[in-house]
Amino acid sequence: MAGDWIKIKTDLATDPAVIGIASRLGLEEDLVVGKLCRLWAWANTHTENGHAGSVTPDWLDKFLGVTAFAEALSDVGWLEVVDDGLEIPRFDRHNGKSAKTRATARERKRREREVSRNRRDNGHAPGVTETGHVFDREEKRRELNHPPPNPPDAIVAAQADSPPCPGAWAGVEGALIQLGVFAPRQAIEGARDGGATPEDVRAVLEVYQSQPGAWGPGAIRNRVLICRPALDPAEGWPATSPDYDRQRQADSEGEKRKERQAEQAREDARRAEAKRAAVQQEQAWGPVLDQLKPDELDQLADSVLGQTGPAVTHYRRRGATGMVRGLLLAAMAGHGYEGAEA
């Protein structure tokens, strides 16, 4: 209807969830805010409680003009895909007639107190009727021209509206605070509403701790928000940060470089050992090999080299030289040769 409004938070563009959506989809945060306003205005007009029957994620993506926008909203807990359509969680807390009535009443009372305080400071105590008339006029003008702040936000509600975390959840909240997570109590509330236990959330945090630097506090908060018993702790995370990916690539290349260096060192050691052994064999058995008669040398070559192959061809053409000499000396050293006593 004309003059209707939705609640929009003044710092929505810097909300961690908005930043995460923008990063995932490759959009500017301001554009994401615009798409959210379009979505919430549509839901405010066409739904009673945020439930849009028969509406699909594909339709919503086309309506907003961004591929995978519905999926990104679902990942941060701002949209749920149900059997018969789509649903905006806690819609009635932030939108709908009752939510607007509460918001208007809170603002009216605040402004009444402000007017009364100003009147008292000026030496004039207004009556209730006078203050009420001032408010009605100001509130009507504000409602027509200026939408109030605060979004239909399933993650960031007023911290004071949430009760302290009980029992084991208090320890989870403390862990999130240590990780720099903004408004952790609301993330915990989302996890609890989905049936998660403190152990489920701790399992999610273990995944984060196993990959230091992969995600920032905003990603941790959004992943805790959608924590569900049936969702694997390693799933549901956004893409890892570019710095983390670069570091992993550098670490991988460093490991490969170390392995290549180690392999080269082993090969160098093997060659050095082979060279040392060849020198020893030449010193011990070279004189013996050189004193063999031709028929004795041929007999040794046949037993060591066989009848065919490159080594035999080399021996027939060049005699006991080069690699063939090394093979003969190694055989003599390994098996002991009768000529050693000669």
Image (spheres, rainbow, N blue to C red):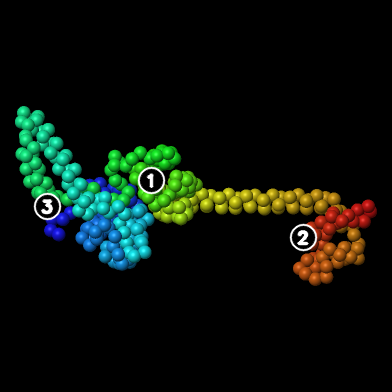
Label 1: state its secondary structure.
helix
Q: Tell me which residue sits at (69%, 49%) in the image.
A: 269
Closest to the camera, between mark 1 and mark 2, is 1
Q: Is residue 153 visible?
A: yes
Q: Position of residue 176 (x, y in %)?
A: 40, 41
Q: Amino acid at mark 2?
A: Gly
At mark 3, the secondary structure is: helix
Residue 322 shows which numbered tag?
A: 2
Q: Nearer the viewer, residue 152 or 268?
A: 152
Question: Which residue carries the number 3 mark?
Answer: 144
Q: Taking 82 as reference, is 92 above or below it? A: above
Left or right: 209, with 266 as reference point? left
How far, Cα to Cα, is label 3 from label 1? 36 Å
Residue assigned mark 1: 188
Which residue is most to the right?
A: 342
Q: Residue at x 79, y 62 (%)?
A: 324
In this picture, residue 325 sits left or right of residue 11: right
Dot 1 alpha-carbon crowd within 10 angstroms: few under 14, some 14 to 19, many 20 or more: many
**Chain-order first, disc 3 or disc 1:** 3
Query: What amino acid is at disc 3?
Result: Leu
Front residue of this view, candidates 304 and 298:
304
The three-letter code of the residue at mark 1 reads Ile
